[in-house]
Image (cartoon, rainbow, N blue to C red):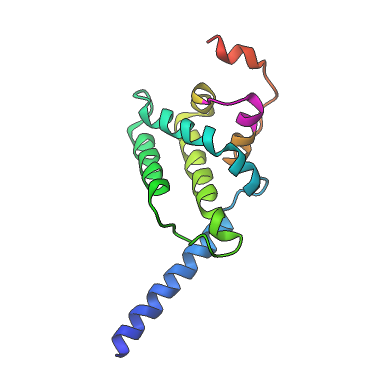
Amino acid sequence: MGTALAIVAGLLLCYVLLVVAVLVARPGQATLSEAARLLPDLLRLIRRLAADEEAPRGVRVRLWLLLAYLAMPFDLIPDFVPVVGYADDAILVALVLRSVARRSGPDKLAQHWPGTPDGLRAVTRLAGLPQEPATDAGARGSR
């Protein structure tokens, strides 16, 4: 009985630490509503980046793992937990995008972004990347 209780207590402690890590890792200026509005474009971006043969293998693996996690019917933090329940997916996407942009460059995000220039600026903010001065939106499409 004592061993089972110790295992349950250990698992509970790990779960609490994961929840705290998700809360701490939340990008400061990004909002959950901003991420939710961008979700369809973010999913297309992630799929496009994962399929990009020029991207480093580690980046593609991270993106495919992220897509698998997002497709799973359960979450790290259940959705019924107020505020944080819905935020875990957005925070995880932001952390992976930050990692991908640092490894393959923000230009890859811009190259594969399917949405508007305003949406791309929101994604770079969500990923915690430095904001660049506004560029001509038409220039990106002509490359």
Expressed as whole percent of the image width and height from the top left, the position of residue 48 reads 42, 28
Q: Residue sitting at 53 percent across and 29 percent down?
A: 106
Q: In this view, does 139 lie above or below 13?
A: above
Q: Residue sitting at 62 percent across and 49 percent down?
A: 32
Residue situated furthest right in the rendering: 133
Residue situated furthest top in the rendering: 142
Task: Give residue 56's quadrant in the image.
Answer: top left
Expressed as whole percent of the image width and height from the top left, the position of residue 37 reads 61, 39
- Residue 61 on the magenta span: no
Expressed as whole percent of the image width and height from the top left, the position of residue 24 reads 58, 58
Expressed as whole percent of the image width and height from the top left, the position of residue 50 reads 38, 32
> Would residue 62 be found to the left or right of residue 113 on screen?
left
Q: In this view, does 123 lie above or below 2?
A: above
Give 46 or 24, whichever is nearer the viewer.
46
Q: Residue sitting at 67 percent across and 19 percent down?
A: 135
> Would residue 43 be found to the left or right of residue 11 on screen?
right
- Residue 115 on the magenta span: yes
Q: In this view, does 3 lie above or below 39?
A: below
What is the span of residues highlighted in magenta in the rendered image? Answer: 113-121
Quarter of the image where the N terminus is located: bottom left
Q: Residue sitting at 34 percent across and 24 percent down?
A: 53
